[in-house]
Image (spheres, rainbow, N blue to C red):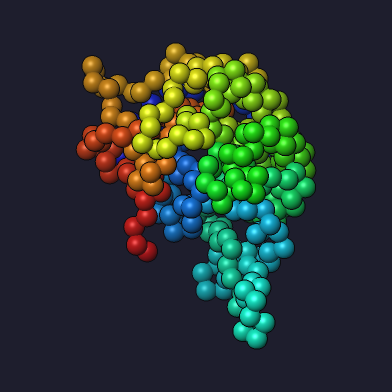
Amino acid sequence: MFRFLRAVMTSFTEAAPHVPIPKNGVDYRGKIVLAPMVRSGETPSRIVSLKYGADLVWGPETVDRAIIGAKRRINPRNSMIEYTRIPSNGGQPNKPAQESVLYRIDPVRERGKLIFQLGTANPSLAVEAAKVVAADVSGIDVNSGCPKPFSTSGGMGAALLQTPDRLVSILEALVEEIGKPYEIGISVKIRLLAEPERTEALVTRLCRTGITGLTVHCRTTPMRPREAAIREQLPMIASICRKSRRGMPDERRCEIPRRGNEAYPRIRCRRRHDCHLCRVQLFMFSLTGRRWPGALARSRPILHGGCAPM
């Protein structure tokens, strides 16, 4: 089902220089992924995505303070790894406290394939949160692209784009205190800034932090999914990453795949999170809306986090 997609994405990376992959990390190149989203990517979605051919899966954005202090346990019924904590009961001290599951991992099916997506605005909290799960995942991805108020109001998500010094310090702390000791990759998801020059400056700084992956949503923070993605900055981003020896593909090959004279329809996300996915190490793949060819339509649940009932 995915031979064509794999062939296309692999062709994007043939000319890319070698990128050192951490021992317990992942090589993003030539992969089909359940991409980073905010309120999607729970365990059922990830497992179904892997079942139908995804190579890598991102979990939902998890705020640092939520996972700090969580207790790790193995569920005896299904052997899942679970991170739990006792809630505050919302000001009802007489109500019996019930342990809640914050994050669940399938240690067999997700081994070597799961990236933990972290919402944070503080280097020390980011490191403290990442230490909780680092031994059970293959990478930590900082979300600095979410434009929703629940994220930006705390200085997280797209708000980090306006505080690049803070974002850089978060990534540098994670690389030194998580990436190196646990031998996993640290990555980040961003949006474009209003001016290409600012995007260029930001990407240049990010590539110097030691990250192994960069996801670019080709819209600015105020833009909505119905607005066309800004593709013009991709060659510039590719050039920066390549010069940083992080292995982007040649920008001349970063284009929508074609069959004969017909361009393949671009793909629209079921979750209305329409974007370009651009990883530092691997590929660029277009996501905007039109009808799919029949062969690709069957891939829809995997590429966009669609989840059948379990």
Residue 190, relative to residue 67: is it above or below? Answer: above
Residue at x 57% of width, y 73% of height: 76
Residue 92, relative to residue 297: is it above or below? Answer: below
Depth check, front residue: 133 or 274: 274
| Quadrant of the rendered image containing residue 19 | top right
Quadrant containing the C terminus is bottom left
Quadrant containing the N terminus is top left
Q: How many marks?
A: 0
Residue at x 45% of width, y 34% of height: 223
Depth check, front residue: 197 or 173: 197
- In x, y percent, where is residue 195? 55, 21
| Quadrant of the rendered image containing residue 84 | bottom right
Residue at x 69% of width, y 25% of height: 205
Depth check, front residue: 95 or 182: 95
Residue at the far bottom in the pictured view: 94
Is residue 271 among what the camera can see? yes
- In x, y percent, where is residue 274? 40, 37
Residue at x 52% of width, y 35% of height: 221
| Quadrant of the rendered image containing residue 289 | top left
Give the left or right position of residue 191, taking residue 184 as reference: left
- In x, y percent, where is residue 216? 52, 31
Is residue 187 among what the camera can see? no
- In x, y percent, where is residue 141? 61, 42
Give the left or right position of residue 151, taking residue 14 as reference: right
